[in-house]
Amino acid sequence: MLTIFERLKDIALEIDKAIKNEDLGYSDQQNATGDEQLKLDVASDSLIEHTLKKVSLVHSIISEEKEEIMPVNPDGKYTICYDPLDGSSIVDVNLSVGTIFGIYDRGNLSGSGLRAAAYIVYGPRLELVVAVRGKAPRHYRSGARGLFSSRAPVRLNEKGKINAPGGTQKYWSPTHKAFIDSLFQEGYRLRYSGGMVPDLHQILLKGGGLFSYPGAQDRPKGKLRMLFEALPFAMVFESAGGEAIDDRGRRLLDLTPEHPHATTPCFFGSKYEIGKLREAYGV
Ligand code: P6P
C-alpha cells in the first residue's frame, strides 16, 4: 500500500503544478454524468490514470469522470476509485480544490471493501491525508523541493464548532432545516466553500463539527458519490474518531452502492454533532 501512497504524492505535485500554470478553460468533453469538463479535469484524470497504471498492486481503476472500469493488472490486489479534481468549478475563482481516492479490495466496491482512503488539498499549501482502516489518518504537507513532511495525526474532538451545510436550502426538508438552524443557535460557525475536500479538511484540522449533504427535494439521493467521495471520507472521519452516516442513520461504511456512480445523503462529523443529527432525524 505504501507504494500507492508514494505515487499519490507524485500525483499531488503534478496536478498542483497544472492548477497553478495551465489553462482553466473548458474542454469540448463531458464526463460520465454529462457535466462539462474543464481542461484541468481532463488533464488531472489522465495524469492519475497513467500514474496508477504503472503500479503493480492496482487491479483496476475507476474515475468519477468516466463510466467504465479500466483494467490495469490481473494480479493486482486493489481497485482504486478516484475523483480527479473535486470542486473544479470553483478553481477559476481561486478557491481550494482536491482529489479523492478510495482504495478497495479488487472487485469489492463497497464500504466493507474499502481498505484505505486518501485526499489531496490544492490550496495555499499542498497537503495529503491518508487513512488506513483503524488507524488515525496521517497528514502530510509539501514544502521546498516538493518534499512532503509529516504533520500531527488527524484527530477529531468529541464536539466541534464548524457547521458546513451543503445543498440548496430551499429544497431542504423541514427536519433538516430545523436541525441546521439548531446548530447555529448553539453558536456553530458557518464554514462552507462548495469544495468538499477543503470543507471537510477544515473540520478535520479544526477539531470537529459537521458537514452535511442531505437528500432534498431536488436531489432525493443527495449529490455526493459513494465510491469516489462519501465512502473515502467516511473512512477518514471514522479513523479520526468521528462518524459518517446517511439520512437513515446507517454507517456509510456499511453500505454498498447500487452502481459505480451512485450517490447518497451523507453526514460527516464529530460524535456530538452526529448524535444531534440522529436525534433530529429520529434514526
Ligand atoms: P452544492 C463540488 O461540485 C461538489 O461535488 C463537492 O465538492 C461539494 O461539497 C458539493 O459539490 C457542493 O454542492 O450543491 O452545495 O454547491
Image (cartoon, rainbow, N blue to C red):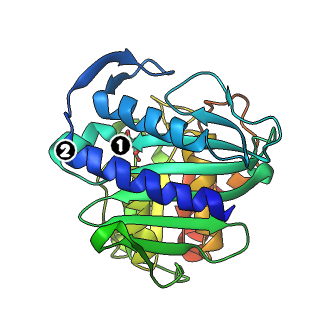
Q: Is mark 1 within 8 Å of ligand 1?
A: yes
Point out which mark residue 87 bears: 1
The N terminus - image quarter: bottom right
Near mark 1 (Cα within 10 A), the count class, few <14, some 14-19 or many ≥20, is many
Residue at point 29% right, 20% down? 27
Q: Secondary structure at mark 2?
A: helix
* Residue placed under numbered mark 2 in the picture: 21
Residue at point 45% right, 55% down? 10
Spatial separation of the CA atoms under disc 2 and disc 1: 18 Å
Residue extending furthest toward the left = 93
Q: Tell me, yes or no, if residue 278 can be seen here.
A: no
* Ligand 1 quadrant in view: top left
Are discs 2 and 1 less than 8 Å apart at CB?
no
Q: How far across and how far down the image is residue 83, in percent?
A: 50, 41
Q: Secondary structure at mark 1?
A: loop
Q: Which amino acid does the dot numbered 1 rest on?
A: Gly
Near mark 2 (Cα within 10 A), the count class, few <14, some 14-19 or many ≥20, is few
**In the picture provided, is 146 more to the left or to the right than 216?**
left
**Sequence order check: which comes first, mark 2 or mark 1?**
2
Residue extending furthest toward the top = 28
Q: Is mark 2 within 8 Å of ligand 1?
A: no
**In the picture provided, is 29 more to the left or to the right than 111?**
left
Q: How far across and how far down the image is residue 281, in percent?
A: 61, 55
- Residue 272, quarter of the rendered image: bottom right
Q: Reply above or below: 4 against 109.
A: below
Point out which mark residue 122 bears: none
